[in-house]
Image: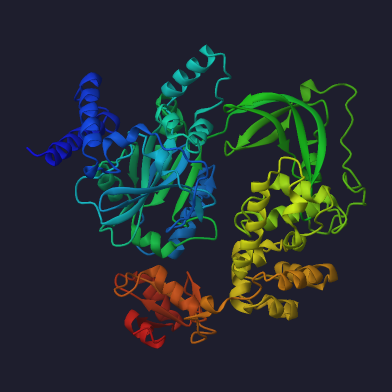
Amino acid sequence: MSVEQKIKELRDELREHNYKYYVLDEATISDYDFDLKLKELQNLETKYPEFFDANSPTQRVGGEVTKNFETIVHEHRMYSLDNSYSKEDLQDWETRIKKLVDGEIQYACELKYDGASISLTYEHGNLIKAVTRGDGFQGDNVTANIKTIKSVPLQLKGDFPPKFDIRGEIVLPFDGFKKMNEARIELGEEPYRNPRNTASGSLKLQDSVEVAKRPLECLLYNLKGTKLGITTQFESLEKARKWGFKVPEAAKLAGSIDEVLEFVEYWDVHRHDLPYETDGVVIKVNNLQQQEELGYTAKAPRWAMAYKFKAEQVSTTLNSITYQVGRTGAITPVANLEPVELAGTIVKRASLHNADQIEKLDIRVGDVVYVEKGGEIIPKILGVDLTKRPVDSKPTEYIAFCPECHTELIREEGEAQHYCPNYNGCNPQIIGRIQHYISRKAMDIDGLGGETVALLVNEGLIYNYSDLYELSKEQIVPLERMAEKSAENLINGIRESKNIPFERVLYALGIRYVGETVAKKLAKHYKSIDTIIKASTEDLVNVDEIGIKIAESVNAFFTSEANNYIVDRLKQFGVQLEISAEQLEGQTELLKGDTIVVSGVFEYVSRNELKKLIEDNGGKVSSSISSKTSYIVAGANMGPSKKDKAEKLGVLLIKESEFLQKINYF
């Protein structure tokens, strides 16, 4: 046997033992014998470096040090999930989806594991990269750390597709967490608070040797890619298991919401027997074609819903109420609590939302309050234990003046919150707007964080986000915690932000009610900031998905002389305030005024490509058929009820090939 064959044989054998032990939980070899074989392989690889393989079992031990994690854009966006807490929520969800798809709906029910989300990319059966969820659009490359996790296959087996992503959670089992804490206590160190945060923190450790020491596991549940040869979510779980992934067995196919609830009720009790943290159940429409038909909202898939188990509750004392000023001037009352442990973390503060909430709860300083983690993430006050209320207790009087600049607060009709109207003179508003401008989804300025922004404002170096472009390295170096290199990185980050595309700049401006999706719609419709500035409220309302509230807010923003002055300065500094020629390339007005529904399975392009082609040619994509629908692009397997509805409304059906000819695709 040649050296190359021997190395290959050892790798295959070790991978199989690894898979059986860490994925199937079946030991087929003693630890001692496994270590001997691993050592033999290491020696051969050292002696014959020409046979190096990045995905060899020897590469799991770590050794790579990563100081700065590279940011990578997800090829397939990682959406968050909408939450439900009752049978009624699930029934409402089912009613909505049944209006949008034809045929019988089955649901894949899976446990929602509480860990750190990860996306793994495989090409030709090899792990290529592992990226954290980040903001859903982009995350951090943590491949070196993920490779140390034994349940992550570095090389797949079976009939896997040539390229795909698989999503899952990195979790820390209770047993491993307990052992880690016992070791820390023995060394006189503080124990970790909970498995979820410890798992999440492990992914960003700089030394992969340290990650290798932690008993992390990776549970996979969702495939992403094109032409995967899979028709249902349940089939994807079975296939992923065969390829070598650790896919939880606790999954069920349900034919009704009642069956879904049986699964929920069972696991609400039995989750405490599991080796990992879980906080609910994820329910997905099983048929992948139906998933495509349903599509996504701006934040979440319409075809999936998380059902959250009842959150843990504790009681503690409300010590004081303070008030925070947001970037829009909105005032948020904050409850400062006697520290209490809740769901594995120490809770000291909780949001009281607004004056109405304080009045509704009749919450007062000194009260004993009930606290839970809403969705087990954000602490929330549920009510007051009136039996323990102090005799001298006085009702809470909501503040009348801004806690920062002392301007009298206003509360507009129909608004829940009070606002500080001192837009240009209230420090937290100024700092908040600049922090929003530099944030990841906006200008994403490297080297500049929220604390540095506050420092720059407080030192009088900047007063608004356009001032960032006049900063010099010499001004920054003397600041606290600022070295020569940090200052240089900050200036470079600001300079590079001039290349950020227009829709993100528009979002970065911080116009009230203009989130990412609205910014994209406005940028696509108006093409430049100048056209938006000239648009009347009536014009703005005519843009797809722009209501009167958003239109008035946009109009008010650009009526302000101060805002227009800042925008003019951004123009002078070269910030992108119009859609670039590259972005406009391939865009036409061929479908202007057309509202088009896409339904069925397509031959030439994918459903998502079809939707993009409609938008690139000036059309609007709609998910439901109505009298306003111009026509339907109908693929194979279009549902009969959609055909019937189209017929009743007299809506034209055209083939995929006809549509592509219409926009000169061929």
Q: In this orientation, does residue 121 appear?
A: yes
Q: In this orientation, does residue 417 appear?
A: no
In the image, 384 versus 434, the foreground residue is: 434
Give the image quarter of residue 470: bottom right
Q: Is residue 275 above or below residue 467?
A: above
In the image, 311 versus 213, the foreground residue is: 213
Q: Residue at x 80, y 51 (%)?
A: 457
Q: Is residue 645 above or below residue 240?
A: below
Q: Residue at x 34, y 58 (%)?
A: 225
Relative placement, left or right, of 214 versus 124 is: right
- Residue 492 position within the rendered picture, expressed as x and y whole percent measured from the top left: 63, 57
Q: Residue furthest top?
A: 186
- Count every numbered label the image shows and give the total: 0
- Residue 419 position within the rendered picture, expressed as x and y whole percent measured from the top left: 83, 53
Give the image quarter of residue 542: bottom right
In the image, 493 versus 120, the foreground residue is: 493
Q: Is residue 535 above or below residue 269?
A: below
Q: Residue furthest left?
A: 1
- Residue 405 position within the rendered picture, expressed as x and y whole percent measured from the top left: 90, 49
In the image, 53 versus 13, the foreground residue is: 53
The quadrant of the picture occupied by the C terminus is bottom left
Image color mode: rainbow
The quadrant of the picture occupied by the N terminus is top left
- Residue 512 position within the rendered picture, expressed as x and y whole percent measured from the top left: 73, 61
Relative placement, left or right, of 29 versus 357 is: left
